Image: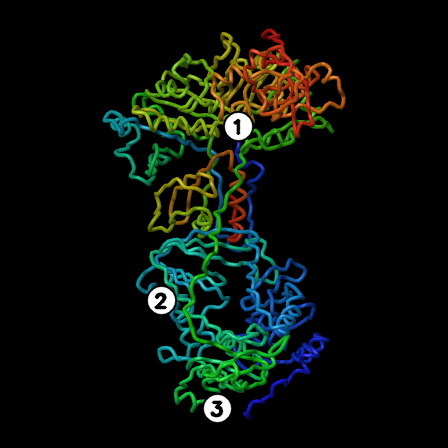
C-alpha cells in the first residue's frame, strides 16, 4: 500500500498555534487515508441492489436527506441534492463499488481529489461559522448531519460527527488556500494541529 | 448662583479681534490646558490612569474614558473636524471621538489643522456651514461570522437588556449587540429609577442574570450597519481599535451576518438639534453627550453651562447636572408656554430661566463664548439678549434612533481561486519558477542556475524535440461520464458526425453551443462501454462542464452521471523521441505487452501504483500522457525523473509547452475564442512566419497576439483587416518567431505574403501564410 501524498505537505505542521495557548479552542487533524465515492443510482434503489446492500453491508435503507448513516467504518451520506456519497474506510467502499452495476448506477472515486480535515474542540463550530452561512447550531445541524456548503467560494462537504467534531472535505487543489484561511481564522481561538 | 452676564451688543469683540490676529493665543487663553474638569463619581476609573497623546501633547486620562471625555477632562476643546487615532508609532485611522476608547499609548490628532481656522473664517464671514463629512475607518483585515439566533437585540439600554432577558428566559437563543464598549446604554448615565431600583443597580442585576443564562451572548463594540429583509442584519465589530498592543491573532474588523427569527431594535433615541448660526462651535453638546460626560465619565463639559431645551427633559437634565455639582448657569426654553413646575424648578435651583426664547446664534470663532437669544414670538427686529457661557447643552426633543441608511452590505469573503497541482511541491523543489495560468499555479520554467526565462523555455523545448521532456498536466480538466445514456449525450454534445471511440481508445472532438460556436476542444477516452473520461484544457473545463450538464438536464435520458474529477487525478506528459525508451525503463509493464497504438490507453498497476497510460502527444511526435491518483502523482514524477535523467529527461514548464503547442499548431484559448465555429476554425487557422527580410532585421518589431492582418499588396492597411494573430512563440528549433492566426479564407492563402499590423499602425511585420504546423518531430524507435 502506497502512502498518499498530502495536499498540505509542507504546510501542516503539528503543534500549538494562535492565541489562547493555555486552552486552545480548536483541534485540526488531517485524515490522510480515506475513500470517498460518489454513487448515482439511475432509477433509485432497485430491489436487487437493496438486497445486495443488505446482505453485504447490512444496509436496510438509504439515509434520509441531509444525513450520514454509519456503515462499517464509513458513512453513507445523502445530501439534499445530487448522488449518494460514501466516506470512510476502504473496505465498505470496495464492496459498494462492486455492488452497483453499470445498469443500476455509477460509482466514481474522489478519494484522491479531496482533502479531509477533522475539526474538533469547543470552538470548532464557531470557527466554521467564519465561513459557512448555514445554521450550525446543534438543533439545526445535529450529529450525523451532512451538507454541501461553500466557504469563500470553495465548495465543501461538511459532516457533523458529534457536538464538537466535524469532518470537512474540500477540493485537493485548493487545500493550501483553505488551510491558510482556516488557520488564520482559528488563530483567535488558539488551535492544535494534530 | 448669580445672574448670568448680560452683555450688550458688541461685547466680546475684543476677543474676536484677538482670535483674528492670533488664534493660538486666543485658544490657549480660552481653554487653559491641563485644567482639571474631573468631577466625583462616574465610571472612568482614577485608579487606572492611562497616558495618551493628542496633537503632540502628552495627556492623562482614565480607564473607561472616551477620547472626548479625556480631552475635555484635560481642559481641551473637542476638535471641529474628524480625528485620527491609533497606537503610538502605528497607523492613525479615522475615529469617532465619542466612541474611541482610551487606552495606554493612544495617539490622536485632528485629521486636518485647517478645520479650525477655516471654520473661524466662515463664522466671521457668516457663511453657511458645509455638510460634515463622515469618515469611515478602513476595515483592515476583515473576517465574517454567520450567526443564527432566535432573537437579536440591538442596544443594551434598559429596554434592550429587558428584551434580551425576557426572550432568554423564555428559552430563546439570544444575541445582544452594543456599539459602545460598555453595556448599559442610557443606564450608564440616567437617574430615572427602574423597577424601584437605581439604574446602576438594575443594570448590574440584569447583566448578572443574563451572564448566567447559557443561551445569551452579548457583544460590545458592535454596531448594526444594514438590514436585509426582515430577518437578516449585518453588523460590524472593531476588534483592535481599543487595544494598546495589536493582537496578531485577531482581524481588525469582524462583520456579523445575523439571521434571526426576531430582530428587536432597542437603540433608544437621539437628541434633535436646534437650528441656529454657529451651532457647530466647540463647546456645544447635545443632552446625551453632556449627561454621559458628567454622569458616566465624571467630566464637566465646560465652566459656565447654558441649557437650551424645548421640553421637560431639559429640566430633568438640569436636575441631574445640579445633583453632580454642575448646575446650569441659565435655562433657555423655546416653548412659549412653559409649565409651572418648570418655573418652580428653576426658581428652586436659582437658575435664570428664559421661557419662550430661542437662540439665534452662538458667539465665538474658535469656541463658544456665549449665545444670543431673542423671544420666540419676535421677528428679527426684537431685542437680543447675550448670555456668556463656554458650554451649551441643547436638545430640541428626542427621536428614535434608526439604523443608518445607505451603508453598503460588506461583500462576502472570497478565497483565492488559485489551484495547486499535486506536483506543485515536486516542481518547486526542482526550482521551478511558478506563475499563474487561468485558475492554476503552474511551473512556467525550471531554470538551470541563473538561466533567464526565455533561455530556459528554449532549452526545455529543444529537449522535447531532441530527447525527452516531462511536464505536469495535472491541471487538465477531467470529467467522468457514466451511464447507459452517455453515448447519446456525447453525440449531441460533439455533433452527429462524432463517432464514439472504441474501448481503450481516445478521440478528439469539438464541443459546441446550440448555434455551432465552439466551446472547447476535448479528448474523449472510452474507459468501458458506458463510461468515458473527457479531458480538456483547464480554461475550457467550466464551459465544457456547464454545456454537458445543460444537455443532460435538457435531455429525456437521465441515466447518466457527470462528475468533475480534475482533482482526483495527477498527470504527466512524457514527450520526445526518447520518451518510449524512458517509459520502458521506468514503467516496464506499460510497454511489455503489445505496444499502445496512437490514441490508445491502458490502465495498469505497477508496484501498487495505479496508472492510466495514453499514447498521445501534445507536441506532436512520440508522447505519452500518464495519469495516476493525485496522492501518488509525486511518486510517478520521481520515478520517471529518476529513470529518465540518465537518458536526458528534462523537466518542462508551461512556457515550453506553449511553444510546443504553437509549433504543433494546436488550439488554445485564443483560437477557440467563443466566436468561431469548428468549420471556420479549420478553414481560418493558419501558421505565420516573418519573411526572411523581416526575420533578419535585428530591430524588427516582433509579432504579438492581437495584431491585425492585412493584404500584403502594398496598399495602406485600413479597416478591420482580414484576420488577427492569436498565438506567438519564438521557436528555438527554427530560430525565429512563429504565430498562429485566424485569417479569412486562410487555408486558401497558403504561400501568400500578408502584413501583421500592431498598435496604432506603427508596428508592421511582413509574414508568410502557411499550414499551422511548423516542426516535424523526430521519432526514435522503441527501446532505442
Q: Secondary structure at mark 2?
A: helix
Q: Which quarter of the rendering shows the C terminus of chain B?
A: top right
How crowded pointer 3 is (Cα within 10 Å; few <14, some 14-19, many 20+) is rated as some
Q: CA distance from mark 3 to mark 1?
A: 83 Å
Q: Are marks 3 and 1 on the same chain?
A: yes
Q: Toward which corner of the image does residue B621 lie, by quadrant?
A: top right
Q: Is residue A171 left or right of residue B466?
A: left
Counting residues from the N terminus, which is met first, the one under dot 3 or under dot 1? 3
Q: CA distance from mark 1 to mark 2?
A: 55 Å
The label shown at residue B475 is 1
Dots 3, 1 in contact, CB < 8 A:
no
The label shown at residue B349 is 3
Which residue corresponds to the image point at 38% horizontal and 30% vertical from the top-left? A38
Residue ID for mark 2: B163
Q: Name the subunit of mark 1.
A: B
Position of B398 relative to B560 (above/below): below
| Visual colour scheme | rainbow
Q: Which quarter of the rendering shows the N terminus of chain B?
A: bottom right
Instruction: Judge by depth and name the residue closer to the eye, A47 or B769.
Output: B769
Q: Toward which corner of the image does residue B499 lie, by quadrant?
A: top left
How crowded pointer 2 is (Cα within 10 Å; few <14, some 14-19, many 20+) is rated as many
Counting residues from the N terminus, which is met first, the one under dot 1 or under dot 2? 2
User: Which of the two discs, 3 and 1, sits closer to the camera?
Assistant: 3
Amino acid at each position: 500500500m502506497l502512502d498518499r501524498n498530502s495536499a498540505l505537505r509542507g504546510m501542516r505542521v503539528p503543534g500549538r498555534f494562535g492565541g489562547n495557548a493555555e486552552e486552545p479552542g480548536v483541534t485540526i487533524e488531517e485524515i490522510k487515508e480515506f475513500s470517498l465515492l460518489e454513487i448515482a443510482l439511475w432509477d433509485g434503489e432497485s430491489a436487487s441492489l437493496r438486497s445486495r446492500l443488505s446482505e453485504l453491508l447490512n444496509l436496510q435503507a438509504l439515509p434520509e436527506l441531509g444525513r450520514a448513516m454509519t456503515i462499517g467504518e464509513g458513512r453513507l451520506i445523502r445530501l439534499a441534492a445530487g448522488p449518494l456519497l460514501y466516506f470512510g474506510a476502504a473496505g465498505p467502499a470496495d464492496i459498494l463499488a462492486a455492488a452497483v452495476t453499470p445498469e443500476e448506477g455509477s460509482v466514481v472515486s474522489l478519494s484522491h481529489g479531496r482533502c479531509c480535515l477533522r475539526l474538533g474542540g469547543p470552538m470548532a463550530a464557531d470557527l466554521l461559522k467564519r465561513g459557512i452561512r448555514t445554521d450550525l447550531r446543534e438543533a439545526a445541524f445535529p450529529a450525523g448531519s451532512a451538507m454541501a456548503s461553500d466557504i469563500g467560494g470553495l465548495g465543501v462537504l461538511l459532516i457533523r460527527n458529534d457536538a464538537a467534531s466535524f469532518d470537512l472535505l474540500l477540493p485537493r487543489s485548493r487545500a493550501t488556500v483553505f488551510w491558510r484561511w482556516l488557520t488564520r481564522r482559528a488563530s483567535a481561538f488558539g488551535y492544535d494541529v494534530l | 448662583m448669580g445672574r448670568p452676564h448680560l452683555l450688550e451688543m458688541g461685547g466680546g469683540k475684543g476677543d474676536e479681534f484677538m482670535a483674528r490676529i492670533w488664534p493660538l493665543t486666543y485658544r490657549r487663553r480660552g481653554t487653559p490646558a491641563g485644567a482639571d474638569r474631573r468631577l466625583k463619581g462616574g465610571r472612568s476609573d482614577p485608579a487606572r490612569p492611562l497616558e495618551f497623546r493628542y496633537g503632540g501633547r502628552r495627556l492623562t486620562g482614565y480607564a473607561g474614558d472616551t477620547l472626548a471625555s479625556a480631552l475635555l477632562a484635560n481642559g481641551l476643546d473637542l476638535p471641529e473636524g474628524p480625528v485620527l487615532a491609533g497606537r503610538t508609532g502605528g497607523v492613525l485611522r479615522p475615529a469617532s471621538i465619542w466612541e474611541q476608547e482610551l487606552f495606554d499609548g493612544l495617539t490622536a490628532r485632528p485629521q486636518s489643522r485647517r478645520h479650525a481656522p477655516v471654520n473661524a473664517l466662515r463664522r466671521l464671514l457668516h457663511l453657511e456651514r458645509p455638510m460634515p463629512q463622515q469618515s469611515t475607518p478602513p476595515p483592515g483585515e476583515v473576517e465574517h461570522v454567520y450567526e443564527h439566533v432566535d432573537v437579536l437585540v440591538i442596544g443594551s439600554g434598559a429596554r434592550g437588556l429587558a428584551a434580551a432577558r425576557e426572550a432568554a428566559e423564555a428559552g430563546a437563543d439570544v444575541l445582544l449587540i452594543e456599539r459602545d464598549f460598555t453595556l448599559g446604554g442610557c443606564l450608564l448615565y440616567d437617574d430615572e429609577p427602574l423597577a424601584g431600583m437605581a439604574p446602576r443597580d438594575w443594570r448590574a442585576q440584569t447583566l448578572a442574570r443574563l451572564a448566567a443564562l447559557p443561551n445569551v451572548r452579548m457583544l460590545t463594540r458592535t454596531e448594526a450597519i444594514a438590514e436585509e429583509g426582515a430577518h437578516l442584519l449585518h453588523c460590524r465589530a472593531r476588534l483592535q481599535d481599543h487595544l494598546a498592543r495589536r493582537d496578531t491573532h485577531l482581524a481588525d474588523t469582524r462583520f456579523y451576518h445575523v439571521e434571526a427569527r426576531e430582530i428587536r431594535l432597542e437603540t433608544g433615541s437621539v437628541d434633535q438639534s436646534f437650528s441656529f448660526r454657529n451651532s457647530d462651535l466647540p463647546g456645544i453638546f447635545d443632552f446625551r453627550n453632556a449627561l454621559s460626560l458628567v454622569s458616566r465619565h465624571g467630566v464637566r463639559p465646560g465652566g459656565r453651562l447654558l441649557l437650551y431645551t424645548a421640553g421637560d427633559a431639559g429640566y430633568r437634565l438640569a436636575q441631574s447636572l445640579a445633583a453632580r455639582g454642575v448646575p446650569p448657569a441659565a435655562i433657555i426654553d423655546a416653548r412659549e408656554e412653559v409649565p409651572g413646575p418648570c418655573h418652580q424648578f428653576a426658581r428652586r435651583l436659582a437658575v435664570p430661566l428664559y421661557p419662550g426664547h430661542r437662540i439665534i446664534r452662538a458667539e465665538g470663532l474658535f469656541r463658544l463664548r456665549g449665545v444670543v437669544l431673542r423671544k420666540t414670538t419676535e421677528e428679527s427686529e426684537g431685542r437680543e439678549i447675550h448670555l456668556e457661557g463656554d458650554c451649551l447643552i441643547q436638545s430640541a426633543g428626542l427621536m428614535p434612533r434608526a439604523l443608518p441608511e445607505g451603508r453598503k452590505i460588506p461583500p462576502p469573503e472570497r478565497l483565492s481561486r488559485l489551484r495547486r497541482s499535486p506536483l506543485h511541491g515536486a516542481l518547486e523543489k526542482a526550482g521551478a519558477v511558478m506563475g499563474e495560468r487561468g485558475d492554476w499555479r503552474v511551473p512556467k520554467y525550471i531554470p538551470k542556475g541563473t538561466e533567464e526565462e526565455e533561455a530556459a523555455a528554449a532549452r526545455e523545448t529543444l529537449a522535447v524535440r531532441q530527447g525527452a521532456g516531462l511536464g505536469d498536466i495535472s491541471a487538465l480538466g477531467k470529467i467522468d461520464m457514466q451511464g447507459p445514456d452517455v453515448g447519446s449525450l456525447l453525440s449531441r454534445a460533439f455533433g452527429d458526425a462524432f463517432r464514439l471511440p472504441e474501448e481503450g481508445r481516445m478521440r478528439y472532438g469539438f464541443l459546441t453551443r446550440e448555434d455551432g460556436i465552439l466551446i472547447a476542444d476535448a479528448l474523449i477516452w472510452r474507459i468501458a462501454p458506458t463510461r468515458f473520461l473527457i479531458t480538456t484544457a483547464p480554461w475550457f473545463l467550466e464551459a465544457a462542464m456547464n454545456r454537458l450538464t445543460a444537455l443532460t438536464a435538457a435531455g429525456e435520458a437521465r441515466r447518466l452521471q457527470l462528475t468533475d474529477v480534475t482533482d482526483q487525478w495527477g498527470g504527466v506528459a512524457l514527450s520526445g523521441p526518447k520518451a518510449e525508451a524512458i517509459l520502458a525503463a521506468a514503467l516496464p509493464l506499460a510497454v511489455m505487452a503489445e505496444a499502445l497504438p496512437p490514441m490508445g490507453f491502458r490502465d495498469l498497476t505497477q508496484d501498487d501504483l495505479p496508472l492510466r497510460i495514453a499514447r498521445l502527444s501534445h507536441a506532436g511526435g512520440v508522447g505519452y500522457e500518464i495519469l495516476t491518483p493525485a496522492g501518488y502523482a509525486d511518486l510517478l514524477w520521481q520515478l520517471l525523473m529518476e529513470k529518465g535523467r540518465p537518458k536526458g529527461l528534462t523537466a518542462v514548464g508551461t512556457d515550453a509547452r506553449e511553444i510546443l503547442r504553437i509549433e504543433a499548431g494546436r488550439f488554445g484559448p485564443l483560437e477557440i475564442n467563443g466566436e468561431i465555429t469548428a468549420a471556420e476554425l479549420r478553414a481560418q487557422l493558419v501558421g505565420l512566419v516573418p519573411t526572411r527580410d523581416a526575420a533578419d532585421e535585428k530591430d524588427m518589431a516582433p509579432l504579438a497576439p492581437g495584431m491585425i492582418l492585412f493584404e500584403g499588396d502594398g496598399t495602406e492597411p485600413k479597416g478591420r483587416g482580414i484576420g488577427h494573430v492569436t498565438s506567438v512563440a519564438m521557436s528555438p528549433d527554427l530560430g525565429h518567431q512563429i504565430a498562429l492566426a485566424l485569417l479569412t479564407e486562410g487555408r486558401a492563402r497558403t504561400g501568400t505574403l500578408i502584413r501583421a499590423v500592431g498598435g496604432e499602425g506603427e508596428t508592421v511585420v511582413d509574414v508568410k501564410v502557411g499550414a499551422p504546423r511548423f516542426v516535424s518531430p523526430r521519432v526514435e524507435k522503441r527501446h532505442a
